[in-house]
Image (cartoon, rainbow, N blue to C red):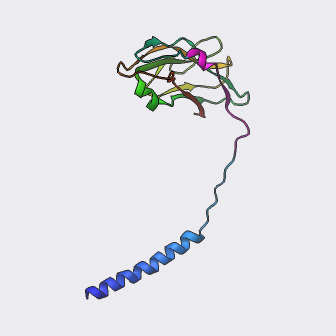
Amino acid sequence: MKKLLIIGLVAVMLVTGGMFASTYTTATATIGVTAPTSDFAEVTAENLTALAPTVFGKYTGTWPSGTLFTITPDASYTGDLVIRAYLVNTGALSRYYEHLNMSLQFTDNTSTITDEQGITQVLNLQNSEVMFDWENATGDSPYKVELTGGGYRLHSWKSMSGGSVQPQLWMEITQR
């Protein structure tokens, strides 16, 4: 009886496995993709090297203020946008920095905070993303993501050799 049951299970697996393999090798799917005719905005990275001091082991300091990114909205887009800034090399930074805090603001060309929340946001090793909501992307262009301060301290037990480990930032703009 056991032999018969095992033979039956093997036969069922062979038949269904064969049908699956046949479908797997012969089935097709089509995905339609449409590219937009223009971007929502143009993003320009400013001279970030001037804002990043050279730091060496066992050092404590503050970040200077300045523009990180300039954003010029497309003239034909009047909707809402979400601007995200990311600290992308937290793994490398956490090996050297005990703490790292960067205060960021989203402003217009008159340096008025333009973010819906109207606040300064902090980018750090534990929170490597900040998000600004931009309602009705029109107005006093160009806009800026500005570094307004912050501080850092390197691990006292870690000594850098051969230079400095600097934060790397990434900017993303999406439709809200």
Q: Position of residue 37 (x, y in %)?
A: 74, 39
Task: From the viewer's side, name the closer residue of 132 and 57.
Answer: 57
Identify the residue shown where x is 73% and y is 27%: 75
> Hey, which quadrant is residue 168 in on the image?
top right
How many discs appear?
0
Residue 158 in sight in this render: yes
Identify the residue shown where x is 46% and y is 14%: 150
Residue 83 in sight in this render: no
> Hey, which quadrant is residue 142 in on the image?
top right
User: Which residue is farthest left?
Assistant: 1
Quarter of the image containing the C terminus? top right
User: Is 49 left or right of 9, judged from the image as shown?
Assistant: right
User: Is 37 left or right of 10, judged from the image as shown?
Assistant: right
Quarter of the image containing the N terminus? bottom left
Q: Position of residue 115 (x, y in %)?
A: 55, 20
Decide whether residue 5 is among the magenta residues.
Answer: no
Identify the residue shown where x is 66% and y is 54%: 32
Identify the residue shown where x is 45% and y is 22%: 160
37 up-or-down from 76: above or below: below
Task: From the viewer's side, name the closer residue of 89 and 140.
Answer: 89
7 up-or-down from 131: above or below: below
User: Which residue is farthest front?
Assistant: 162
Decide whether residue 37 is among the magenta residues.
Answer: yes
Q: Position of residue 130 (x, y in %)?
A: 49, 26
Range of magenta residues: 35-51
35 up-or-down from 110: above or below: below
Q: Position of residue 62 (x, y in %)?
A: 47, 11
